[in-house]
Image (cartoon, rainbow, N blue to C red):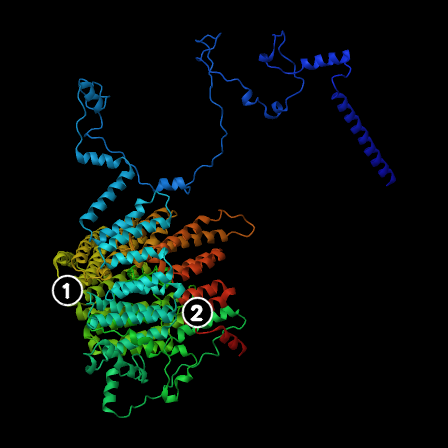
C-alpha cells in the first residue's frame, strides 16, 4: 500500500512540472515585439511558410512552385475509399468521341449519370398493401373497340401495303375524320375510365330521382350504390355512413310514409347512435306504423339482440304487446290503422317466433303453455264469446286457465268450451283418478360420478333436467298438492306470461299450420319432409345434426326422405358437442305428445287428419332411423315393436284403411327393420287397393316410387344385377290395371306401352303449369315430383342414365319457368312452398346420378353440373349441399368448391351456404390433422402444419357473421366459438363469446358451450345467465348440496 501511494504521488508531481513547462512556453510565444529575434528563428519561420496552403489569387507574384507537399494523411480517404463529392470537379462532356482512338475499331462508352441518390430498400408490395388493395377494388378498365368490321386496314392506292390506319389514309387523301355519332361518343367516353362510368351512373340516378322522387326502391338502390362509389376513396366508415344518412334523410322528406326508408335509416344509425337513442327511434317508428307485421318482426329482433338492455321478461312483454296490438288491428278496434294484407299470417309467425325464443332461452315451460293456451283458445272456444273482440275473449279465457282444469296434452283434458258449459250448468266436477305411473324422482341418480369437476357435474345435471323437466308443473289435487309444493317456481306458468299473446286463428289452413308447428316443436318432422330456409328461420337454426348427418351408403336413393330440419326439438337444447342425442322425448314427453295427437285429430277435417297422422308415422320412422344409426340393437328392437304396434293401430281406424300414404310409411318401417318379405306384402296389399288409379294419383305414384327405389337398393346391396321387380312395379303403375305380385316375367310390349303412357302423362301435364289455376297448384306440384321420379327411374332401368337425365332436365326447366311466373303473378305464394317440388325433383335427379356414378363408369362432370345448377337456384337445400360435399370430397383440390361456395353465398340471404362451406373446410382440416397425428412421436411430420386452413375457416366465420341474416344465427356463433377454442386460440375464443352475446344474447346453449370450453369461469357465466333471466335449472349452490348428500 505504501509503494502504491508513493507512485501515485510521483505521478502528480510529474504532471505539475509538465503544466509549468507548457505555461512557460506559451508565455514566451506571446511576448512583446521588443523581444530579441535570432537568425535561427527566421529560418524556422521561412520553412513554416513554405508548408502552408495558399490560393493562387492570394499570391502577389507568381511563384515557380505553387504546390506544396502534404505530409499528413487524410483519414477520410482510407475510411470512405473515395473522394468527397464536393472535391470532385464537375464538367460537361461535348460529344462521345475520344481522341486517339480509331472510331471504326474502338469505342468508349461514357456513363454521365448524375450523382447517385441515397436509395431506401423498399419491400415488395403484397396483396394486402393499401395501394394494391385500392387497385384490386377498382373497376376493370376496358379499351373501346376500334370501329370497322375488320381489324386490318383496307388496301387502297394511298395505302398499298395496308400498314396505315384509317386516320392516316384519310390524311393522305386530303380528307378529315368523319363526325362521331352521339351514342358512340358516349360509349367511348364511358370506356375511358372507371370514374366517368361512376359519374354517369350518379347522373342517371339523379335524373331518375328528379323524375320520380316517390320511388322507394330507387332511393334504396342509390343508397346502396354509395358503397361502390366510395370504394376507392380513403374515407372512414363513419364518413360513408354519414353520407348515406344524408341521402336517407332527403328520401324520407319526400316519402314520409315509407317504412322501408325509415328501416334503412335505423339500420345505418346502428353504428352512429347510442343504444338508448336507437331504441327510442324504434319505439317511435312502431308507434307510427302499428299495423305493419314485418316492421314488428324486425323490431322484435332488434329488441332481443340488444345486449345492454336485454332480459327475457322485457322481450317477452314486447312480444305480448306486439301480438295484442296486431290483434286489435285485425279486429278493427284500432280505427286509425286498417289491417294490411297478410296480417293473420304475420300474427301466427310472430307467435311461433315467440315460442322458439322462449325455447332457446331455456323457458320451455312457457313455450309449451303458449301452445296449449292457443290451441284451447282456437279449437275449444265457447260459442257465446266468438263474436267478441280478442281482448274480451282473453278476459273470459283467464278463469279457465287459473281453474286447474286439464289442458291440451294432459290426461283428461276436455277443453275451455266444456269447462264453461259445466260452470254455467253447475254441479260437481268428477276428479280424475290418481296416476300410478308417475315418473319417480331422479334426484338420487342425477350425479353420476362425484369425482367429476363441479362444472362438469353442473353441465350433466342441467342437461338432464332440460331433457326431463320441460313440461310445466301442475299441482295434483288428487294427492293434495298445492302451488307451494313446487320445488322450482319457474316450472309454474302464470296467465300474465301468456295472456297478451293470445290471437285469433280462424282460417282452416292456419289452424292446421298451428297444429303442425306445435308437433314440429315437439320433434315431429314437417309434412313435406323437406328443409328450406327463409330469412326469418336463420334465427331458429341451432341444431348441428343437419350438418353432420351423412347419408347412409346402403340407401343411396332413399336417404333423403326425412332430412333434419336444423332446429332442436324441445328438451334437446344442450351444449354443442353433446353426444347424448336420444331418439324421441322422455317418458312423460312421449305420453304428452300422444295425448296432443289424439286430442287434435278430432278437431280438424278428414283431409287434415290424414296429414297429421302421416307426420305421426314419420316420427316413428325417424326414431327407428336414429336407432339404426346409433347401432344399439336392443333399443332398435324395442323401438321397432312400439312403432309397428302404433302403425297397425292407426291403419285399423276406418278413416285410415284406404290411406296409401300411411300404408307406404308402414311398409317402409318394416323394410328398415329388416323384415323385407313382410314389407313386400304390405306394399303389394297397398298396390292392390289403389293401382287402378294409375298415374293420376300422386300418392300412388309416391308409393310405387319408394317401392321401386327400395328394390334397386336391395339388389345393389345383395350383389345382384337384375332390377326386374322395380321395372314391373313401375310398369303396373303406368298400366292402371289390376295388380298381381311379381312372378318373374315382364313382357317387352308392356314396357313399351308403359313408356308411352309416362310420356303422354308428362307431356299433357307440363303445358298445364303455365296456364293452370293457382288453386290446383299444390296438388299438381306434388303430382309432378312423384310422376317425374317414377318416369326417371323407369327410363334409367330400361334405357339408361342418359334417358333418365333427359326426363329430369325437361321437368326441371319447366318447373323453373312455371315457378318464376307463379311468384310474379301470385303474391300469396310463399317461396318455400313454391320450390318444394322443385327441390324434391332436383334431389331425386342428383341422387340417381350419384348412384350411377358409384356403380358404373360415368363422368363426374355431369353430376357436378347438375348439382351446381340446382344449388344456384336452391341455395337453402340441405340435402343438395350434403350431396355436393360428398361429390367434392373425392377430389384433392378444394379450389373449385371454394369458388362455388363463394359465388352462391353472395347471391342469397340464407346462411346455409356459409354453414356447409365451413363444414367442408373443417372436414378437410380434420383429415389433414389426422394424417399428421398418424406419425410416430419420433418421426418428423411429412408436411408442415397447415395454418392456412385455420385462417380460411376463421375468415368464413367472420364473413358469415357480418351478414345481416348470419349475425343472428345461433348455430353459426356456437360453431365459431367451438372452433376457435378447439384450434388453440382460447383467448380469441373468449372474445368471440362476448361478441356473440352482442348478437344472440338469448341463446342458452351459447352459455353452456362457454361453460364447457372455459370451465374456470363457470360462476361468471352463471351470474350472467341469472342477470339476463335465462332459465337456470340447477344453481351452483344446489350442486353443492347434491354433492354433500
Instruction: Give the residue pinned by disc 1.
Output: 775
Residue 609 is at least partly visible in this image: yes
Q: Is residue 642 above or below residue 695?
A: below
Q: Nearer the viewer, residue 904 or 929?
A: 904
Which residue shows up at 24% across the image and 72% down it? 327
Crowd class of label 1 (few under 14; some 14 to 19; many from 20; radius 10 Å): few
In the rendered image, the residue lying farthest to the right is 2
Q: Mark 1 or mark 2: name the one nearer the start of the chain.
A: 1
Cα distance in 3D space between marks 1 and 2: 51 Å
Q: Describe residue 886's horizontal placement relative to residue 950 as left or right.
A: left
Q: Describe residue 367's horizontal placement relative to residue 786 as left or right.
A: right
In the rendered image, the residue lying farthest to the front is 34
Q: Quadrant of the N terminus?
A: top right
What is the x, y in percent for residue 355? 32, 70
Helix, strand or loop at mark 1:
helix
Q: Describe residue 917's horizontal placement relative to residue 460 as left or right.
A: left
Crowd class of label 2 (few under 14; some 14 to 19; many from 20; radius 10 Å): few
Q: Is residue 399 above or below residue 881?
A: below
What is the x, y in percent for residue 946? 46, 48
Instruction: Give the residue pinned by disc 2.
Output: 1027
Residue 583 is at least partly visible in this image: no
Amino acid at each position: 500500500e505504501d509503494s502504491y501511494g508513493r507512485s501515485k504521488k510521483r505521478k502528480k508531481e510529474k504532471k505539475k512540472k509538465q503544466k509549468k513547462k507548457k505555461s512557460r512556453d506559451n508565455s514566451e510565444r506571446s511576448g512583446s515585439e521588443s523581444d530579441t529575434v535570432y537568425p535561427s528563428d527566421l529560418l524556422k519561420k521561412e520553412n513554416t511558410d513554405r508548408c502552408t496552403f495558399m490560393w493562387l489569387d492570394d499570391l502577389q507574384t507568381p511563384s515557380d512552385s505553387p504546390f506544396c507537399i502534404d505530409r499528413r494523411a487524410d483519414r477520410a480517404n482510407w475510411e470512405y475509399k473515395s473522394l468527397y463529392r464536393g472535391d470532385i470537379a464537375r464538367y460537361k462532356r461535348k460529344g462521345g468521341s475520344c481522341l486517339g482512338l480509331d472510331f471504326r475499331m474502338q469505342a468508349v462508352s461514357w456513363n454521365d449519370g448524375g450523382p447517385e441518390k441515397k436509395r431506401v430498400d423498399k419491400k415488395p408490395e403484397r396483396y394486402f398493401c393499401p395501394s394494391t388493395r385500392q387497385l384490386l377494388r377498382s373497376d376493370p378498365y376496358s379499351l373501346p373497340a376500334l370501329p370497322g368490321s375488320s381489324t386490318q386496314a383496307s388496301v387502297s392506292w394511298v395505302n398499298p401495303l395496308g400498314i396505315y390506319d384509317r386516320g392516316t389514309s384519310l390524311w393522305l387523301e386530303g380528307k378529315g375524320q368523319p363526325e362521331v355519332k352521339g351514342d358512340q361518343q358516349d360509349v367511348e367516353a364511358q370506356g375511358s375510365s372507371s370514374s366517368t362510368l361512376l359519374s354517369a351512373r350518379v347522373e342517371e340516378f339523379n335524373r331518375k330521382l328528379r323524375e320520380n322522387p316517390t320511388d322507394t326502391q330507387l332511393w334504396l338502390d342509390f343508397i346502396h350504390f354509395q358503397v361502390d362509389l366510395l370504394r376507392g376513396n380513403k374515407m372512414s366508415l363513419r364518413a360513408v355512413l354519414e353520407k348515406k344518412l344524408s341521402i336517407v334523410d332527403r328520401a324520407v322528406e319526400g316519402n314520409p310514409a315509407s317504412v322501408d326508408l325509415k328501416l334503412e335509416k335505423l339500420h345505418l344509425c346502428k353504428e352512429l347512435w347510442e343504444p338508448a337513442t336507437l331504441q327510442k327511434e324504434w319505439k317511435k317508428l312502431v308507434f307510427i306504423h302499428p299495423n305493419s307485421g314485418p316492421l314488428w318482426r324486425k323490431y322484435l329482433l332488434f329488441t332481443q339482440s340488444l345486449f345492454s338492455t336485454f332480459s327475457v321478461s322485457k322481450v317477452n312483454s314486447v312480444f305480448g304487446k306486439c301480438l295484442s296490438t296486431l290483434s286489435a288491428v285485425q279486429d278493427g278496434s284500432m280505427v286509425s290503422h286498417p289491417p294490411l294484407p297478410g296480417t293473420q299470417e304475420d300474427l301466427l309467425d310472430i307467435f311461433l317466433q315467440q315460442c322458439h325464443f322462449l325455447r332457446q332461452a331455456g323457458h320451455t315451460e312457457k313455450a309449451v303453455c303458449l301452445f296449449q293456451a292457443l290451441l284451447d283458445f282456437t279449437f275449444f272456444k265457447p260459442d257465446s264469446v266468438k263474436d267478441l273482440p280478442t281482448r274480451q275473449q282473453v278476459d273470459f279465457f283467464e278463469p279457465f286457465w287459473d281453474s286447474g282444469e286439464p289442458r291440451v296434452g294432459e290426461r283428461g283434458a276436455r277443453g275451455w268450451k266444456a269447462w264453461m258449459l259445466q260452470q254455467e250448468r253447475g254441479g260437481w266436477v268428477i276428479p280424475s283418478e290418481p296416476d300410478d305411473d308417475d315418473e319417480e324422482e331422479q334426484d338420487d341418480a342425477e350425479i353420476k360420478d362425484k369425482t367429476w369437476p363441479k362444472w362438469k357435474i353442473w353441465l350433466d345435471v342441467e342437461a338432464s333436467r332440460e331433457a326431463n323437466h320441460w313440461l310445466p308443473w301442475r299441482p295434483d289435487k288428487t294427492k293434495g298438492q298445492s302451488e307451494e309444493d313446487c320445488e322450482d317456481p319457474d316450472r309454474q306458468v302464470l296467465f300474465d306470461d301468456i295472456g297478451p299473446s293470445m290471437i285469433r286463428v280462424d282460417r282452416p289452413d292456419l289452424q292446421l299450420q298451428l297444429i303442425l308447428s306445435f308437433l314440429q316443436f315437439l320433434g315431429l318432422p314437417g309434412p313435406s319432409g323437406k328443409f328450406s330456409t327463409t330469412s326469418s328461420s336463420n334465427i331458429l337454426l341451432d341444431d348441428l345434426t343437419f350438418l353432420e348427418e351423412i347419408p347412409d351408403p346402403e340407401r343411396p336413393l332413399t336417404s333423403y326422405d326425412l332430412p333434419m330440419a336444423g332446429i332442436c326439438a324441445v328438451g334437446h337444447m344442450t351444449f354443442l358437442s353433446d353426444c347424448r342425442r336420444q331418439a324421441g322425448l322422455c317418458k312423460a314427453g312421449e305420453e304428452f305428445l300422444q295425448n296432443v295427437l289424439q286430442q287434435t285429430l278430432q278437431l280438424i277435417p278428414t283431409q287434415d287428419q290424414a296429414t297429421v297422422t302421416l307426420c305421426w308415422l314419420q316420427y316413428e320412422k325417424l326414431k327407428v332411423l336414429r336407432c339404426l344409426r346409433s347401432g344399439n340393437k336392443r333399443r332398435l328392437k324395442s323401438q321397432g315393436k312400439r312403432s309397428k304396434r302404433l302403425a297397425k293401430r292407426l291403419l285399423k281406424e276406418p278413416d285410415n284403411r284406404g290411406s296409401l300414404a300411411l300404408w307406404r310409411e308402414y311398409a317402409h318401417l318394416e323394410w328398415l327393420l329388416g323384415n323385407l318379405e313382410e314389407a313386400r306384402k304390405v306394399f303389394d296389399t297397398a298396390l292392390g287397393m289403389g293401382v287402378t288409379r294409375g298415374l293420376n294419383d300422386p300418392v300412388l305414384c309416391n308409393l310405387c316410387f319408394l317401392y321401386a327405389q327400395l328394390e334397386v337398393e336391395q339388389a345393389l346391396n345383395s350383389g345382384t344385377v337384375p332390377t326386374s321387380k322395380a321395372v314391373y312395379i313401375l310398369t303396373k303403375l303406368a298400366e292402371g290395371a289390376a295388380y298381381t305380385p311379381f312372378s318373374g316375367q315382364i313382357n317387352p310390349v308392356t314396357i313399351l306401352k308403359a313408356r308411352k303412357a309416362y310420356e303422354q302423362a308428362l307431356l299433357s301435364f307440363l303445358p298445364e303449369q303455365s296456364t293452370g289455376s293457382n288453386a290446383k297448384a299444390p296438388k299438381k306440384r306434388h303430382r309432378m315430383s312423384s310422376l317425374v321420379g317414377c318416369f326417371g327411374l323407369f327410363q334409367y332401368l330400361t334405357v339408361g342414365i342418359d334417358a333418365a337425365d333427359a326426363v329430369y332436365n325437361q321437368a326441371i326447366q319447366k318447373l323453373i319457368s312455371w315457378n318464376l311466373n307463379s311468384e310474379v303473378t301470385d303474391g300469396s305464394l310463399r317461396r318455400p312452398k313454391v320450390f318444394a317440388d322443385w327441390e324434391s325433383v332436383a334431389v331425386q335427379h342428383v341422387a340417381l346420378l350419384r348412384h350411377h356414378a358409384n356403380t358404373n363408369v360415368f363422368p363426374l362432370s355431369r353430376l357436378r353440373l347438375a348439382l351446381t345448377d340446382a344449388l344456384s337456384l336452391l341455395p337453402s337445400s340441405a340435402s343438395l349441399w350434403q350431396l355436393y360435399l360428398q361429390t367434392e370430397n373425392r377430389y384433392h383440390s378444394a379450389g373449385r368448391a371454394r369458388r362455388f361456395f363463394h359465388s352462391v353465398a353472395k347471391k342469397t340471404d340464407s346462411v346455409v351456404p356459409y354453414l356447409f362451406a365451413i363444414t367442408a373446410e373443417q372436414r378437410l382440416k380434420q383429415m389433414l390433422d389426422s394424417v399428421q397425428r398418424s406419425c410416430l412421436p419420433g418421426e418428423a411430420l411429412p408436411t408442415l402444419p397447415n395454418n392456412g386452413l385455420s385462417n380460411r375457416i376463421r375468415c368464413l366465420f367472420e364473413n358469415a357473421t357480418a351478414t345481416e341474416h348470419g349475425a343472428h344465427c345461433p348455430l353459426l356463433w356456437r360453431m365459431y366459438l367451438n372452433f376457435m377454442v378447439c384450434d388453440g386460440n382460447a383467448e380469441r375464443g373468449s372474445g368471440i363469446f362476448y361478441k356473440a352475446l352482442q348478437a344472440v344474447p338469448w341463446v342458452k346453449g351459447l352459455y353452456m358451450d362457454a361453460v364447457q370450453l372455459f370451465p374456470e369461469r363457470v360462476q361468471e357465466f352463471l351470474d350472467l345467465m341469472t342477470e339476463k333471466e335465462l332459465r337456470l335449472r340447477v344453481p351452483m349452490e344446489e350442486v353443492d348440496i347434491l354433492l354433500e348428500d
